Image (tube, grey):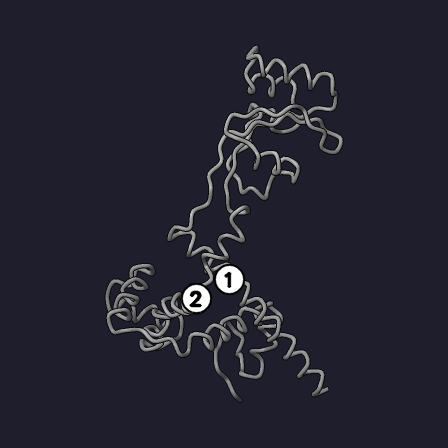
Amino acid sequence: MNEIIKVANQTITASEIIPLLRRYLLLPQLFREIIIDHAIAEISCTPEEQTSAEERFYGKHKLTDDKARQAWCENHQITLNQLKTLATRELKLEKFQQQTWGHRLESYFLERKQQLDQVSYSLIRLKDKGVARELYYRLEDGEQSFAEIARQYSQGPEAQSGGLIGLMPMTMPHPQIARILKLSQPGQLWTPTQIGEWIVIVRLEKLIPAQLDQAMRQRLLKELFNRWLGEQLQQFIEQGNSGSGNRE
């Protein structure tokens, strides 16, 4: 019998692996890792990069000495050489992402910038236009603070925070509110606006424009990679299904 591993009282053979992965919904993860391995196969690392990657991996997993590394390998049923390969995999993936999409980051950032900007604003919503106008004039004249009026009159959950809704991507507010915020200066109060069944009073509190710094570069690289990986995975699955159908 082609026995490969034993878990509890169950012996698992090679022929049973795929059905088990399918049962536990792990096949897509297996396909994902295969695609990644294929993508980074030609990526090379210098000896210095290899050493640095290994040290980071060992530190992350608290593998501070040879005994700890050996125990970790035994627990995961891999060899020490396979551990070294695993330790550099993340670095190779980072290099693959940079080589593949690094030249696109500036243009992709400009495409995504409005969605990446962060915004905080204050909101009062109610259904009576007359009351909304009266409250707007109170705010404009400084008779009451926005927070006081929001707590007393706003009919949404924002009343609990004095009308303050903060920081979130610009894509999250209602599209009409987002358009208002994009045209606003911090502290600018807008006249009551009808949005669906509500009358809203909006004031921009803070706008934090996205910047293409190192953290943003890494985020965008991962976005582009994950998009590509999803497409590759879909193709992989479709080809597999097509192959299964042909065999049938």
Residue 214 in the figure: left or right of residue 181: left
Towards the viewer: 215 or 213: 213
Q: Amino acid at mark 2?
A: Gln
Q: Is 128 drawn above or below residue 243 in the view shown?
A: above
SS of the residue under disc 1: helix
Tell me whether circle 2 and circle 1 mark residues in contact (CB < 8 Å).
yes
Quadrant for the C terminus, please.
Answer: bottom right
| Camera-nearest residue between 133 and 183 | 183
Q: Position of residue 81 (x, y in %)?
A: 32, 78
Looking at numbered disc 1 in the image, what kind of residue is underneath it?
Leu
5 with respect to 134 (left or right): left
6 on left or right of 131 = left
Residue at numbered disc 2? 97
Q: Secondary structure at mark 2?
A: helix
Q: Earlier in the sequence, mark 2 or mark 1?
A: 2
- From the viewer's perspective, is residue 225 above or below residue 12? above
Q: Is residue 242 above or below residue 119?
A: below
| Residue 224 marker | 1
